[in-house]
Amino acid sequence: MSDPHSDSHIPETAKSQPTKSQPTDFQPADSQPAIHDVPMAGSAAELGGAIHLAVDLGASSGRVIAAGLDNGKIRLAEIWRFENTPVRMNDGLYWNHLGLWHEIVHGLRLAVDQVESAQRNPGGSNQNGPGPRIVSVGVDTWGVDFGLLDENDEILGPVRCYRDPRNVGMLAEATQTISRDEIFAETGLQFMEINSLYQLIAARKHNDVPLRHAKSFLMIADLFHWMLSGVKSIEASNASTTQMLSPQTGQWSTKILDAFELPHEWFPEPTPAGTSIGVVQPSVAALTGLHDVPVVVPATHDTASAVLSVPAEGFAPAAPDWCYISSGTWSLMGVELPKPKVNSLCAELNFTNEGGVHGSTRLLKNIGGLWVFQQIRAALQRRGDAPSWAEMVSAAEAAPPFALILNPDDPSLLAPPDMIDEICALAGRTGQDVPTNNAVLFRAALEGLALRYRITLENLERLTESSIKTIHIVGGGSLNELLCQMTADACNRTVVAGPVEATAIGNVVMQMIGVGKLHSIDEARQLVRDSFPTRTYRPQNTAVWEAPAKRFIEFS
């Protein structure tokens, strides 16, 4: 999942604007630094044949992307990009879900206008085949957050952000009702206070008015699918992030719902990714021009969509020889398995069993990701110094190695008022030299992430009893050449970086499966391999990482 913190700590994102003329230093939070570009069509008008529209919402920005096939390869066109900034009100942190809906509708309208322009002027398309036509639309988002509807299907109150401070302490409170071991046995999920279950417990503790009047519960992506289609559903991969779903059965845990007095009728049977839940409802069609267009739910959890686009051979092997890192503000590192691993070792290591496509399990670890790197830059901006992402990476590359060891998952780095001040304080607490130049900070943020990957890889191999030979890095972090090489060296594994637009690609190929254009995950991944370039990094200097890895464990 992608992850900003608050309205004062969101990394830069683009202002709402068309996509053709981004400034050279434009980088959304989850795609920095820009080392190479992903070729995109200038508009949907340049795509021919069947077009799928992917609404890709991250926790700091959102996009509407059109995709079609061009000579047997996927071609993307970014139609619209907009900010997604949580709003702080009183002591709460909320999503502007109505503002997001406005931006989504605007982006869909732009896509339709571009396609209709190409239909009126077929010579403007670069395709020799059929003219463009929109055949489906689907939404992916981050996990855990949700909206509530009342008996009249009206949205109850603003949608809370998972970083809302009232969630703090709710995990401990939950274990007074049912033990930690029982919760894990029922859900197989990593314990994080952002999980939907603990948000619901917080709502009840605060005598939340929306909770008292709620008749329906919808994950955030499903909320937008409901707005599009008028159909209420909860897609399976996002349902698995709630800590209320059984990974063994794929159904809601009666034990968890009953223990916390959550109404069963709120939770319909999870909908498999690739399901067409209906068509764009008339009121929305009037706004967007998407008349009778199917709404096909992708793997709505952005990480599940990103994993689908990993250009690996095979699908959900019992003994995987590759793992993935979906790299952005968060890093999600794991393997794709045919069934969950709900055992004492998984609980001890605090790994998570989240739902993947076609019944697979994503056994993974949530890691702090590029958050620290991003927030160092945000702190410098507040000081009047705004280096570009490329400048930060260049400075990190020239800095002395291992001058400071940072664990990106240290609780003190989760949401500090100022990241630089907090890192300096952490260095003092751990007996390290307090950094005196920015380059040391930049390098430490990246080295700490690579070291975290190393530990996670070792634990994945323990959990799966397999030997992982290749690490696939997808998403914005795959652009960071220094981090990719550090990962190869720290882990002593081959790293394959790309595709960058992993989540949107996964969204699109699942829509293609849903409408019958593709017939299997293997076929989808072959299409991804044929369509998008990757870059391979080989381990080069592994021995120097041994001593820092031991220090990292000590500090953790």
Image (tube, helix red, strand yellow):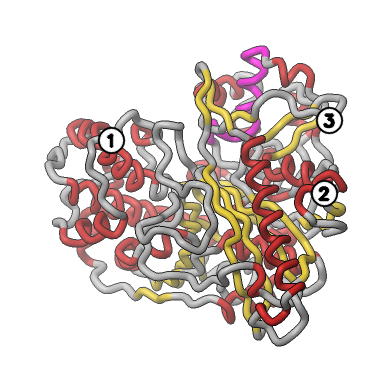
**Residue 1 appears in view:** no
Callout 3, which amino acid?
Answer: Asp
The residue indicated by pointer 1 is: 382
Q: In front here: 229 or 467?
A: 229
* Label 3 environment density (alpha carbons within 10 Å; few <14, some 14–19, many ≥20): some
Residue 54 position in % (x across, y down) = 67, 58
Residue 528 position in % (x across, y down) = 60, 74
Residue occupying image coordinates x 74% and y 68%? 512
Mark-to-mark CA distance, 2 and 1? 44 Å
Residue 139 relative to residue 175: left or right: right
Q: In front here: 322 or 6?
A: 6
* Secondary structure under the numbered disc 3 in the rendered image: loop
The residue indicated by pointer 3 is: 153
Callout 2, which amino acid?
Answer: Ala
Say whether marks 3 and 1 touch (CB < 8 Å): no
Residue 503 position in % (x across, y down) = 58, 59
Callout 1, which amino acid?
Answer: Arg
Residue 122 relative to residue 1: left or right: right
Q: In front here: 205 or 14?
A: 14
Residue 4 relative to residue 537: left or right: right
The residue indicated by pointer 2 is: 286
Disc 2 or 3, which lies upstream in sequence?
A: 3
Q: Nearer the viewer, mark 3 or mark 1?
A: 1
